[in-house]
Image (spheres, rainbow, N blue to C red):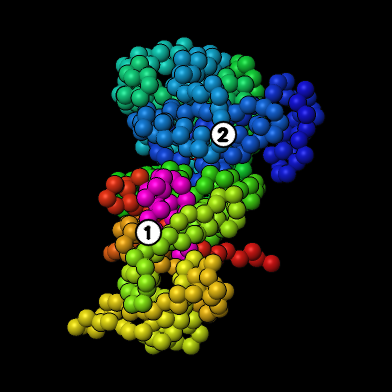
Amino acid sequence: MTELFPARHFIHDFINQDIEEGKVPHKIHTRFPPEPNGYLHIGHAKAILIDFGVASEYGGLCNLRMDDTNPSKEDTEYVDAIKEDIKWLGCDWEDRFYYASDYFEQMYQFAIELIEKGLAYVCQLSPEEFKLRRGDLSTPATSPYRDRPIEESLDLFRRMRAGEFENGAMTLRAKIDLASPNFNMRDPVIYRINHAHHHRTGDKWCIYPMYDYAHPLEDALEGITHSLCTLEFEDHRPLYDWVMNNCSVPYKSRQIEFARLGITNTVMSKRKLRLLVEGGYVRGWDDPRMPTLAGMRRRGYPALAIRNFCERIGVSKSNSTVEFAMLEHCVREVLNSEADRAMAVIDPIKVVLTNYPHESELLDAENNPEKEERGSRKLSFSKELYIERSDFMEEPVKGFHRLMPGGEVRLKFAYIIRCEEVVKDEEGNIVELRCTIDPESRSGLPGANRKVKGTIHWVDAKTAIPAELRLYGHLFNKENPDDTEEGQEFTDFVDPVSLVIPKVSYVEASLADAEVGVPYQFLRQAYFVKDKDSTAEKPVFNRIVTLKDGFKVKA
Ligand code: ATP
Ligand code: MG
């Protein structure tokens, strides 16, 4: 007997109720049923974490099932990507990996059963006629084929399977209620003819079951106790139950719906994401600007941050859009303690230390102030450095406490310097700052604690590595890109500066050992992660998220 689980949301309430009423004969069993026609996005992550999460809370099981009833679109690249993403999120289907297409023969037999029971018939209305006869709220739908003899439907359905008819020539319809106020119940099509190659069954089938008919059967055949899905299926639940009740299935599953996840400044439909990829708006499904799990992983979002995010947004019955900033907040929260620190200069200006007495030195720098056990590294320091262009102002505004002519600033982990001279080229651009150091001011020397107002980051020009830094912003410059007016496309709102790559950037020498996928905090800048596009000559780093948190918890 399955134990109750302390309810945190309504799905727990429903399941607890089923357990108490003795309706759950075996372990709680859920499934995640992606259609392999694209990569998973963060909306799917919500569903995955609910499906696998609820099962594990009750000590139950969750299957992974590829919903491949639609033959033309599926691709094995997607199947592999889906598996990888789910594993990355930390969910495990163990040996329970299925394809809906595995059940095609059983689904066909259930259809024969329905016809024999007088509960399904072959309808020869053309798609146009079908539409014209759909009726409206006050008028029932009609079909002249509804009352044809069972034998005739059986014969036609067998011949449909045998490939005798063209696409669209006829369909198999469930005989339910042509006058139902719920249009899903107006004798819905459950099989259609489609002479298309299927990625697993090849050319074996030319009739394919419709989702609303196939899905309940898949659930029933796998002994799924609770079939958790998104709200748009709520109106389809009567049909789900009808199939359960009228086919002699081994188990009757219960469908429970929850709200879809939407996030600002992005789109969340695979169809649209595919258009972005195919239209060249992004550099692939795993482009770090994409809301796909592959994109977020490449961007450097930790799986834990996505899990925390999904936990926090909760499970409810009303669709809502969550601020992107809340996701970023969850990312920062994990990275703040996880990411080691390093220094990088994104837009450099050269500093020459005129009185520096050494060739070079190695200075100690702690790796992570949140985690002492991560220890420290050696930073090389020499006569020529780069600092951030924005850390110098020739004519400082009020409140500017960094480097200025005649002013002092501390170089993080190193000395205090004073700007003595600004060197410009013929056009008046600053090319170099000539500075002096206070030789007593670094750690371990008497002036180590001398206070100046600003501390800035830097890299040693001798050893720093030129790197490509990819600075990402929102992919869309509109809060809801799905909200388009006549003549507009959602792609019109793709932000042209959603990716900015500064001309020359430098990272500290220790990052030569950085691994792809391991996040760093570049001091005073942002979190970054090394990208797979890196080469031996030029590492590439993706900006994961800036340091400043724009997310405000509303009172
Ligand atoms: P899309 O419209 O993005 O293609 P889909 O629902 O067609 O999404 P499926 O592969 O059929 O994609 O979805 C698999 C599961 O993920 C379904 O149970 C679906 O309800 C759930 N899901 C899809 N999108 C979201 C979302 N934005 N929020 C929560 N769950 C989602
Ligand atoms: Mg779908």
Q: Which of the two residues, 304 or 475, is positioned nearer the viewer here? A: 304
Q: What residue is shown at x 34% (from left), y 70% (from top)?
A: 383
Q: Give the quadrant of residue 232.
A: top right
N-term-proximal mark, 1 vs 2: 2
Q: Position of residue 303 (x, y in %)?
A: 53, 44
Q: Tell me which amino acid carries mark 2.
A: Cys
Q: Amino acid at mark 1?
A: Val
Q: Nearer the viewer, residue 280 or 340?
A: 340
CA distance for labels 1 and 2: 35 Å
Circle 1 sits on which residue?
507
Question: Label 2, on which residue?
Answer: 91
Q: Is residue 145 visible?
A: no
In the structure shown, which secondary structural element does the residue marked by tag 2 occupy? loop
Residue 518 in magenta stretch: yes
Q: Tag on residue 68?
A: none
Q: Position of residue 449 (x, y in %)?
A: 57, 74
- x, y (%) of residue 346? 36, 65
**x then y, percent, for residue 50:** 61, 39
Q: Quadrant of residue 81?
A: top left
**Beta carbon of the mark 1 residue lies under 8 A of ligand 1:** no
Q: Which residues are magenta?
A: 507-531
Label 1 SS: strand
Residue count near mark 2 (Cα–Cα under 10 Å), binned few <14, some 14–19, many ≥20: some
Which one is closest to the eye, mark 1 or mark 2?
A: 1
Q: Quadrant of the N terminus?
A: top right
Query: Residue 360, relative to residue 246: is it above or below?
Result: below
On screen, residue 282 versus residue 111, left or right, reads left
Residue most extreme to the right: 20
Examine the rendering and report whether any part of residue 325 can be seen.
Answer: yes
Graded by Cα atoms within 10 Å as few (under 14), some (14 to 19) or many (20 or more), the crowding at tag 1 reads: many
